[in-house]
Image (cartoon, helix red, strand yellow):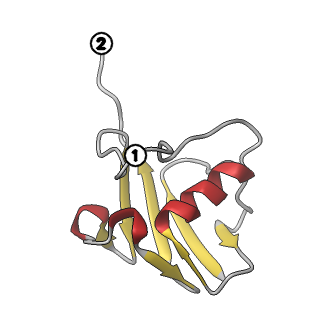
Amino acid sequence: MEIKIISNFVVPGVDDDEHLRLNRSEITLRAFFEKLSKRSPDPWVYVEPDADSIDPDDWEVQINAIPYQDIKEGLKKKLFDGDTVILNIKPQGGG
């Protein structure tokens, strides 16, 4: 299966064409982020292991143009071949 990734940053460990290829027919959003994290040459955490959801202060996530907050299954949402995940880092304020 192939999941397309659109992002506002270079996702570590993803091919230049921004697709994550997996030998599965489906995967949960949590497992997707775990696989994505493992492909990074340096430790990269998208979702804390004990977290029940994605931190909205850090990430803006959409699945097939549906905002993560509108997905009732949350991290248990199943992804399938051809799905698109939009993953953006939210800018951090400061000064």
At numbered mark 1, what does the secondary structure look like: helix, strand or loop?
loop
The numbered mark, 1 or 2, whose residue comes first in the sequence reads 1
Say whether residue 53 is left or right of residue 88.
Answer: left
The image quarter in which residue 90 lies: top left
- The three-letter code of the residue at mark 2 reads Gly
The numbered mark at residue 34 is none
Q: Residue at x 33, y 65 (%)?
A: 74
The numbered mark at residue 95 is 2
Considering depth in this image, is 21 or 29 the residue closer to the camera?
29
Considering depth in this image, is 82 or 10 the residue closer to the camera?
82
Say whether residue 60 is left or right of residue 46.
Answer: left
In contact (CB < 8 Å): disc 1 and disc 2: no
Asked if 17 appears above or below 35 in the picture, the reply is below
The image quarter in which residue 63 lies: bottom left
- Where residue 62 sits: x, y (%)? 36, 66
The numbered mark at residue 51 is 1
